[in-house]
Image: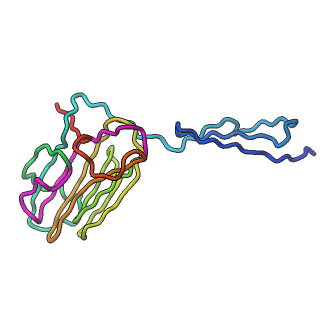
Amino acid sequence: MREMRKLTIAVALFATNALVMNAYANSGHWPIVSPIKGSIYKIGDFLPATNLNNPQQGIPYKYYQFKEELNNVDSISKLATVSTGIASIIDLSKTTREENYAFIFEGYVKIPSDDNYVFSINSDDGSKLVIDDKVEILNDGYHAEEEVEKEVKLAAGFHKIKVFFWQGGAEYALSVSWRSNKIPKTSLPASVLFYDKK
């Protein structure tokens, strides 16, 4: 019966976002063939960026008003649009009233480098953040000011961003922030918000 030998597993995590594993016998005299020798295990790829034909600074928005309170952000798109425009940042400065209104901001965020980015939405009332057509944050419902965050792996370049917000009554708030290994937490600045001008 072949003698059982202990193996040493060498693991290396590289900046290229890959986990490389090799197996070695503790004794250098016993050759081994390991199915994991030199294997590369992807931990998670960065979401690829989108090419824009004519990027312009600013983020397009649609503004809505309603008579009865909404129950969720998905109801916003069913409302009649009151006005549209290009905002410099994502905030509530374009509203003309203090209650029963909604916004949809839709454009691109310019990511400076491949990294893990933590996005957060602070809102009163309901809000939703969509990045590259995927819902990353749902902070919906009628509630006081509340912040929710989510980490997303993004490659450098332009990525779709869409923010939904609705305000019922009483207090209101909306802010979208980000942070990364190189960026301290801050509201998304105007310098990273774009749209593709046709």
Where is the C terminus found, in terms of image quarters? top left
Residue 20 sits above or below residue 101 on the image: above
Residue 163 sits above or below residue 111 on the image: below
Identified at 87% across, 47% down, the residue is 4
- The single residue placed furthest to the right in the displayed view is 1
In percent of width and height, residue 105 lies at 20, 49
Identified at 19% across, 34% down, the residue is 56
In percent of width and height, residue 184 lies at 36, 50
Q: Is residue 105 left or right of residue 137?
A: left
Examine the structure image and report whether residue 103 is included in the region drawn in magenta: yes
Where is the N terminus found, in terms of image quarters? top right
In percent of width and height, residue 138 lies at 32, 59
Q: Is residue 76 left or right of residue 150?
A: left
Residue 140 sits above or below residue 151 on the image: below
Q: Name the image colouring.
A: rainbow
| Quadrant of residue 12 within the rendered picture | top right
Q: How many marks?
A: 0
Identified at 19% across, 48% down, the residue is 89
Examine the structure image and report whether residue 168 is included in the region drawn in magenta: no
Between residue 89 and residue 63, name the one nearer to us.
89
| Quadrant of residue 69 within the rendered picture | bottom left
- The single residue placed furthest to the top in the displayed view is 53
Q: What span is colored magenta in the figure?
A: 90-116
Q: Is residue 161 left or right of residue 184?
A: left
Identified at 19% across, 43% down, the residue is 59
Between residue 3 and residue 123, name the one nearer to us.
123
In percent of width and height, residue 67 lies at 8, 66
